Amino acid sequence: SGLVEFNDVSFSYDGKRPAIEDLSFTALPGQTIALVGPTGAGKSTAIALLHRAFDPQSGIINIDGMDIRALKLTGLRRNIGVVFQEALLFNRSIAENLRVGKPDATDEELRTAAARAQALDFIERSDKKFETHAGERGRMMLSGGERQRLSIARALLKDPPILILDEATSALDAVTEAKVNAALDEVMKGRTTFVIAHRLSTIRHATRILMFDQGRVIESGTFDELVAKG
Ligand code: ADP
Ligand code: ADP
């Protein structure tokens, strides 16, 4: 259902300096948790721990009450969708990239997910049969906004209860930005979402904001609560 708990989680890349220190928080099913704070504050590391790119040296991370180290990696990853511009696979077609989370998806399902992610236009333009290769050449062929939407379409197809996303910082033209924003709103709906937030509207509407600094959460609350605190 998407309940996520971090309990006193600490992690260091080099065994000396902590990247995350005693991190505790709860995300209830369907909440949007915005991670904010300066570069190097530990936001990406916290998210990497959630999908087990690394395991913490101490502390426990639970999903739906289960220690994630007790879950099979495939089971864990089935529960979590990751939306990063960079998360696309090289030397794979657009269709293969879409199908990563759901290998048996039909063309109809691909089309529906692509439409919901505002991605139908460029997918159809670049390849009517979903066969174009998104390798080095494909990467050049897709803009940052298109890669973001492709990544969102993939998450929609997979339909996981938990979503991790890194909002694009790249400058987008107004039309592309509107499409990306609409796609983001669509994919976040109804999922427990952890978002490394750059859009003010995301931060404003988040159920809870976690303000990171030097590996710790120094403030948390809603936008209004944090504004009131100054
Ligand atoms: P505590 O250990 O006291 O829960 P927190 O800083 O986690 O400390 O929570 C502070 C307040 O925010 C508490 O009132 C708690 O109920 C509330 N809270 C914590 N997590 C969430 C959440 N995910 N959604 C809504 N409210 C929350
Ligand atoms: P943020 O996402 O908030 O910018 P990070 O989680 O990337 O922060 O970084 C937290 C700390 O961990 C920083 O001091 C950063 O330099 C360090 N760090 C991040 N990734 C690595 C890595 N792969 N190897 C070593 N140190 C890292």
Image (cartoon, helix red, strand yellow):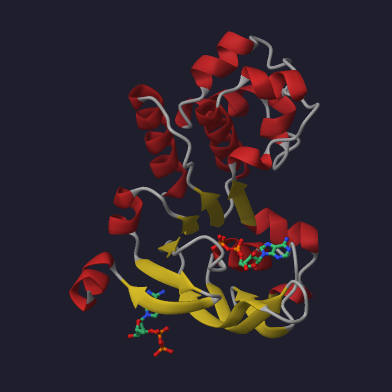
Up/down of 83 relative to 38, above or below: above
**What is the quadrant of the N terminus in the image?**
bottom right
Q: Is residue 126 left or right of residue 37?
A: right
The residue located at (70%, 20%) in the rendering is 138
Residue 229 appears at what percent x and percent y?
Answer: 22, 78
* The one of 120 and 18 positioned closer to us in this rendering: 18
The residue located at (59%, 73%) in the rendering is 64
Q: Quadrant of ligand 2?
A: bottom right
* The one of 43 and 118 positioned closer to us in this rendering: 43
Residue 199 appears at what percent x and percent y?
Answer: 36, 48
Residue 126 appears at what percent x and percent y?
Answer: 62, 11
**What is the quadrant of the C terminus in the image?**
bottom left
Up/down of 13 relative to 110, above or below: below
User: How many numbered tags mark residues here?
Assistant: 0
Q: Quadrant of residue 134?
A: top right
Residue 113 appears at what percent x and percent y?
Answer: 54, 31
Up/down of 67 relative to 155, above or below: below
* The one of 52 and 40 positioned closer to us in this rendering: 40
Q: Quadrant of residue 173?
A: top left
Q: Is residue 208 left or right of residue 26?
A: left
Up/down of 25 relative to 197, above or below: below
Extreme residue in the left direction: 228
The residue located at (33%, 57%) in the rendering is 203
The residue located at (44%, 49%) in the rendering is 188
